[in-house]
Image (tube, helix red, strand yellow):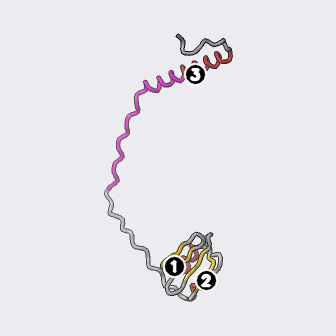
Amino acid sequence: MPIFPARAADPVTDQRIKALEARMAELEKRLGVYESTPPAPIAAPIAAPAATSPVVVAPPPPPKPISAGDWSGLHRGMGERAVTTLLGRPQSKQITSVSETWFYDGDRRVGFDRDGKVDNWSQP
């Protein structure tokens, strides 16, 4: 007993089936050529680099002392990199969802807005 009931001949469907069968035969032929090709030789392993002396990483420099003159260069809209160049690395930072505050010696601080630009500061 056939799995599928007999169907009426449909020339469009028959043409599509023949095209698919031809395409499948071509793909099987291409695959056979690929499978019969011997694998490429495996390259020799890469030699390990010559032994070198270990790299010693120095600790970051301590925050530079801040003079009153350094703070006079601050202005609204400065970026974090410019502030670090001017004042050095802060001793600590406080980060919230809308701002960031950098703390330096004493009560010195620089506040940044959400875009990372200077918004306010308290200078010595």
Q: How many discs mark residues in the rendered view?
A: 3
Residue 88's tag is 1
Q: Amino acid at mark 3?
A: Arg
Where does label 3 land, which residue? 23
Q: Which residues are magenta?
A: 27-50
Q: How dense is the environment of label 2, judged by Cα within 10 Å: few (below 14), some, or many (20 and up)?
A: few
Q: Quadrant of residue 18?
A: top right
Q: Of the residues tagged 1 and 3, which is closer to the observer? A: 3
- Work out which quarter of the rendered image holds the C terminus and state it: bottom right
Front-most of residues 110 and 66: 110
- Are the residues tagged 1 and 2 within 8 Å (C-beta)? no
Q: Position of residue 96 (x, y in %)?
A: 56, 72
Q: CA distance from mark 3 to mark 2?
A: 74 Å
Front-most of residues 96 and 35: 96
Looking at the image, is 30 positioned above or below residue 67? above
Point 58% across, 85% down: residue: 122
Q: Quadrant of residue 42?
A: top left
- Are the residues tagged 3 and 2 within 8 Å (C-beta)? no
Where does label 2 land, which residue? 73
Point 64% across, 80% down: residue: 75
Mark 3 / mark 2, whichever is N-terminal: 3
Q: Amino acid at mark 2?
A: Gly
Q: Secondary structure at mark 2?
A: loop
